[in-house]
Image (cartoon, coloured by chain):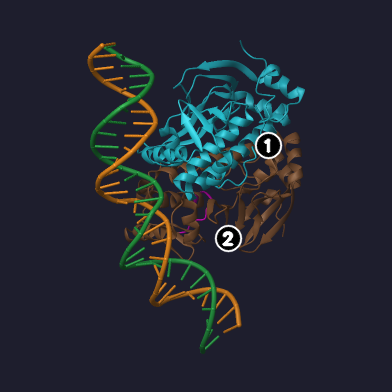
Chain colours: A cyan, B brown, C green, D orange
Amino acid sequence: MTINCKDCPLRQLSAFEPFKKEEIDFMNRFKTGQMEVQPGTHLLVQASKSPQLFTVLSGMGLRYKSLENGERQVINFVFPGDFIGLQAGIMGEMGHSVEATTSMTLCVFNRADIWSLFRSLPDRAYALTHLAAVEEHFLGDALATIGQKSALEKVAWALCQIFTRSAALDLLKNDTCPFPYKQQDLADALGLSLVHTNKTLGRLREEGVLLWKDGNLTIYDRHKLGELASIDTSVPIVRPLM
Amino acid sequence: MTINCKDCPLRQLSAFEPFKKEEIDFMNRFKTGQMEVQPGTHLLVQASKSPQLFTVLSGMGLRYKSLENGERQVINFVFPGDFIGLQAGIMGEMGHSVEATTSMTLCVFNRADIWSLFRSLPDRAYALTHLAAVEEHFLGDALATIGQKSALEKVAWALCQIFTRSAALDLLKNDTCPFPYKQQDLADALGLSLVHTNKTLGRLREEGVLLWKDGNLTIYDRHKLGELASIDTSVPIVRPLM
DNA sequence: TTTTTTCGCTTACCTATGTCACAGATTATT
DNA sequence: AATAATCTGTGACATAGGTAAGCGAAAAAA
């Protein structure tokens, strides 16, 4: 049941950097177990210090931040291969929560072992920092989108991102990828109201650019979507896998 | 002229974690030089791969991202102690540009030496990752603010942040800190128009909360500003210094 | 000194997006 | 089955914030 890292199904994907044998061995020791969670499970909670970190083996989730007034900002959609809990692992406190949207399978690591990673395997420590840098890069993009773009551009940008990531993870079938979220989730990610998000999606649908239905997203005209999003580079970033 | 790391004026500040002697020695070797730049200098350019990384010794700057349509998103204000170029250093490409607002003094490091840092001094590698995590944490906050809050809350949040950081860097004199930016910079940081930013600042001024004039920011009522910003924790984060 | 540019500030007006309210479809609960 | 809850999809209306234009004051350039 528990997968050995050398058989990890994610490792072959184009989204991830190749491993050295040594690294695989290390990860296998670093990995303390595997975990299945149901939709709705809170994996990590804002402002808490979890003793465990995770890598998503399968399933999807949501990083979000709750505000005092009850609003919610979705920080990112969580995909297979994502490493969860770096902030808690390094800083000792999460700035956001992570929740499972579908059922998920997770590789489990111990927070306390991070130190050994830095001491004994610099390659892996570098990979971890690389992951943090990729996240920072993404958040800069997100900030620019949410701060400066119109609703149509925002929605197009988000779905373009999703689609590109899905492609790199080999999740596409006939230009369709799983997208098991609610419109409210997307709205909270983009700083838009539910109603306006809905109308904007309607526009994109009517123009024949895409269809999002029953948890599946189909992009008919990827090029046009990219243009609407004013996307600079749609080259997917290759990142390390933990 | 060139400061030896063991005499670094920043190291004693409450904003930063203490160093081990070993780390200071390492940083001194890691540091290849020092650099003075004039206001307006572009230290790093978006999408480029700089061979150099910097730590700000003194002066202030701006991280920003340019969009295709000519808009600009200010990602963060750059303060003394900030490490600049981590994305280029690790990922090989900057997601944003960094520009000097005042004249600045910078410690210069070689991108190529980062590897040696991971190989020979895990403590410093950990510090680097810590910095990345702190930045990720901040960007999550920023995203939530820009995505969910009103103009008044946004402005209050930003100035509260500035003030708290300044305090930790011992830059306060009579509730006043240097803030050498233009209203347009703040507007671009918060996703607001210049006019609306101006009006919002006017409101805060009229209410006697603050005064921002001639490059100096005075907070008369820090508590009220925090309330307006709906700030959760105003406890400054202690971070490593590179 | 004069001229030009930049910056802060204000007024008048406009529009993208938010809020409210309701309706049908679907899924969970009884 | 019936009931309730959740989600998508609309229309009518309200408003926070954007756009345009201009005016001093100060700084930079001539």
Q: Which residues are magenta?
A: B167-173
- Which of the chains bears the disc numbered 2? B
Q: Position of residue B119 (x, y in %)?
A: 75, 34
**At label 2, which amino acid type do we have?**
Thr
Can you identify the residue that label 1 sits on?
A: B125
Query: Is residue A210 in view from this perspective?
Result: yes
For residue B101, which numbered disc appears in the image? 2
Residue occupying image coordinates x 41% and y 58%: B197
Percent of width and height locating residue A32: 61, 17
Secondary structure type for disc 2? loop
Quadrant containing the N terminus of chain A is top right
Q: Is residue B172 magenta?
A: yes
Residue at 58% x, 16% y is A34
Residue A221 location, quadrant: top right
How busy is the neighbourhood of tag 1: few (under 14 within 10 Å), some, or many (20 plus)?
many
Label 1 amino acid? Ala
Let me know if residue B65 is in the magenta part: no
Whether A77 is drawn above or below A54: the answer is below
